[in-house]
Image: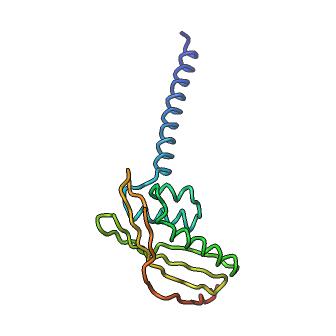
């Protein structure tokens, strides 16, 4: 076998090996970043709230919910209420799960949802306290949601920034 042929063969094998390792690495990284984490109850609640109230993606939210979602109607009603308020008021909404506390070994999570609505320098902030019931069904899933009594809404004005 000639030297040139041998060099081309070695280079070809090296390129194939590099491509295989690169492909496997890319697949592993993609799988790791897109995997749904249902191992920690507070993380599941945060992801559920994010998908339902922030992204407003029912299909993704259902990945974090139990099969029977009838006890989650209060959260869906909140999402619909926020949509109506945005349309009638002409402003945007930001929902931030500010605090999440796990109880009963993960079967309950208490969450403080900070709801900011407004435009420009006027922002109305409401804090709603919610209790989420979870079940371990091949990973934790949100099965119920109930709003608890909480603080009254407050209006705040954000001062303009100076450059």
Left or right, residue 104 beside residue 31:
left
The image's colour scheme reads: rainbow
Identified at 54% across, 78% down, the residue is 115
Q: Is residue 1 above or below residue 83?
A: above
Left or right, residue 44 beside residue 94:
left
Give the farthest residue toward the left: 105
Identified at 46% across, 48% down, the residue is 32
Identified at 54% across, 29% down, the residue is 15
Q: Position of residue 125 (x, y in %)?
A: 54, 84
Which quadrant would residue 120 be assigned to in this image?
bottom right
Q: Position of residue 3 (x, y in %)?
A: 55, 15
Q: Quadrant of the C terminus?
A: bottom right
**In terms of depth relative to the viewer, which is nearer, 85 or 22?**
85
Give the farthest residue toward the top: 1
Identified at 43% across, 62% down, the residue is 142
Q: How many numbered callouts?
A: 0
Q: Position of residue 114 (x, y in %)?
A: 50, 78
**In terms of depth relative to the viewer, which is nearer, 79 or 15?**
79
Q: Position of residue 65 (x, y in %)?
A: 46, 58
**In terms of depth relative to the viewer, which is nearer, 154 or 159?**
154
Which quadrant would residue 123 be assigned to in this image?
bottom right
Q: Is residue 68 above or below residue 2?
A: below
Q: Is residue 134 above or below residue 130?
A: above
């Amino acid at each position: 076998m000639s030297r040139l042929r041998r060099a081309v063969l070695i280079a070809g094998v090296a390129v194939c090996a590099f491509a295989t390792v690169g492909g496997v690495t890319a697949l592993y990284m993609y799988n790791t970043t897109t995997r749904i984490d249902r191992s920690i109850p507070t993380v599941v609640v945060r992801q559920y709230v994010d998908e339902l109230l922030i992204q407003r993606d029912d299909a993704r939210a259902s990945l974090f919910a139990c099969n029977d979602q009838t006890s989650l109607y209060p959260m869906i009603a909140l999402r619909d209420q926020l949509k109506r308020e945005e349309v009638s008021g002409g402003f945007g909404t930001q929902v931030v799960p500010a605090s999440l506390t796990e109880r009963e070994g993960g079967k309950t999570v208490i969450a403080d949802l900070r709801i900011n609505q407004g435009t420009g320098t006027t922002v109305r902030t409401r804090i709603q306290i919610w209790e989420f019931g979870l079940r371990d069904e091949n990973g934790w899933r949100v099965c119920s949601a109930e709003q608890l009594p909480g603080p009254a809404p407050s209006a705040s004005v954000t001062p303009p920034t100076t450059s």
